[in-house]
Image (spheres, coloured by chain):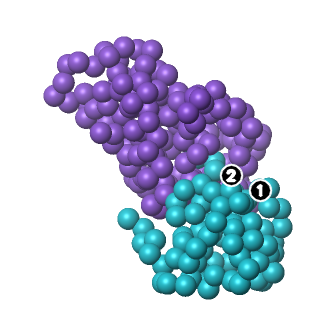
Chain colours: A purple, B cyan
Amino acid sequence: MATVRVQEQDFDVSAELAAIAAGRADIGGIGCFVGTVRDTAGGRRITAMTLEHYPGMTERAMAAIAAQAEARWQLLGCTLVHRVGRLPPGANIVLVLAAATHRQAALDATAFLIDWLKTRAPFWKKEGFTDGSEAWVDARETDTHAAARWSTASD
Amino acid sequence: MTDITAAAGTLHLLYFAWLRERVGTTEERVALPAGVVTVGDLIAWLQGRSPGHAAAFAVVRTVRCAVNQEFAGPEAKLVSGDEVAFFPPVTGG
């Protein structure tokens, strides 16, 4: 059963890694991705990133995709944590952990989950710039292509 | 869990990101308008609801929709009590 959370507060990667492996020795590898707030956007320096989400749908959608990844890669554990609210440059945004018997499944599942989160989970980012202006981040074609490579015949 | 059991006879509309800013509200309840059968019909109806709605739905290809918290296309059918959310393409992760 995956751990899925949407929260304002930061997450502790070490604590989440310890939690996924607690009380078991059958895991051979844990894939880990941490997304963070970059300090520039389109060559402009940003002062903050504000994340909005669709409460209810977000958690449902994240739980569903985690379950899909668990089945597809026979994961032994899966953790998805996504922050919302106003985040400064350098702050953590998202954590993906995928534990499996072997490394390839762990790494593939981690990549699948972050690609999916970027294109299918209802979150929206707004960048704040040093001049006080703000702009919603546009969806990127490259993210859609990255997610599409995981499509299976059943999708 | 979010309450998706809207009052009978109404649609529960939600707006996110720049759609919310342009419409000027996070949510509203409207009676299912006569002649509105699909999401596409609803968008056409909303375009005439206020200047803010018109601005939000000016470029329909930049608008995404979810019905009862599942992604839905313009052909999706609507019934009273549905939760219908409109938002831009997602940018999380």
* Picture quadrant of residue B42: bottom right
The vertical placement of A139 against B26, above or below, is above
Residue B62: assigned label = 1
**SS assignment at label 1:** helix
Image quarter in which the C terminus of chain A is found: top right
Q: Residues within 10 Å of mark 1 (few under 14, many from 20)?
A: some
Are dots 2 and 1 in contact, CB under 8 Å?
A: yes
Residue found at x 52% / y 64%: B68
> Disc 2 designates what residue?
B89
The vertical placement of A84 against A141, above or below, is below
**SS assignment at label 2:** loop
Q: How far across and how far down the image is residue A49, in percent? A: 60, 52
* Picture quadrant of residue A70: top left
Residue found at x 63% / y 81%: B32
- Extreme left residue here? A23
Gap in Å between the C-alphas at discs 2 and 1?
7 Å
User: Horizontally, is B46 left or right of B6 in the view?
Assistant: right
Going by the numbered disc 1, the residue's amino acid type is: Thr
Report the chain holding disc 2.
B
Report the chain holding disc 1.
B
Residue A155 visible in image: yes
Q: How far across and how far down the image is residue A78, in percent? A: 36, 34
Q: Earlier in the sequence, mark 2 or mark 1?
A: 1
**In front here: A9 or B79?**
B79
